[in-house]
Amino acid sequence: MLNRLDYANSYLTLIKNVIDKVDVNDLAEIIVALEIALKERRQVFIAGNGGSAATAGHMANDLMIGVAKKKGSGFRAIALADHIAPVTALANDVSYADVFSGQIKHLA
């Protein structure tokens, strides 16, 4: 079993490796798309599964409320996993694979 210091170092190394794999050009394209969405008041949908569902909810909150605090107006952002009724209805009645695309079909 790793001691706490080894675990912390291992975790930080993992995070650094993930960050090093981020393509800065892809990130720049995402920033441009978000700038356009904010300017044109477009709806932004964020999806996440498992723990990433909570991250998606946090991101939607930051885009709506956090940006509004700084710019006066935030994004029209929604985290699809935050709406449990459609998620479970789609998973039960259609298929789990459609829990996000099924919502987008009706919301977008």
Image (cartoon, rainbow, N blue to C red):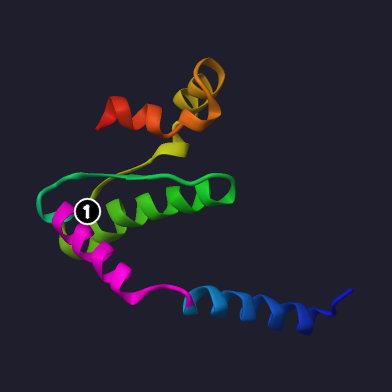
Residue at (39, 27) in percent of width and height: 102
Q: How many numbered dots are placed on residues in this image?
A: 1
Which span is picked out in magenta? 21-37
Left or right, 73 with respect to 103, comes to left
Left or right, 63 with respect to 41, comes to right
Residue 104 lies, with reference to residue 77, above or below; the image says above
Q: Position of residue 44 (x, y in %)?
A: 27, 46
Q: Position of residue 37 (x, y in %)?
A: 17, 52
Q: In the structure shown, which secondary structural element does the residue marked by tag 1 occupy? A: loop
Residue at (25, 60) in percent of width and height: 67
Instruction: Work out whether residue 6 or residue 74 is closer to the camera in this orientation and state it.
Output: 6
**Residue 26 lies in the magenta-colored region:** yes
State the quadrant of the N terminus. Answer: bottom right
As drawn, the residue found furthest toward the right would be: 1
Q: Main secondary structure of the magenta part?
A: helix
Instruction: Work out whether residue 94 or residue 84 is closer to the camera in this orientation and state it.
Output: 94
Amino acid under label 1?
Answer: Gly
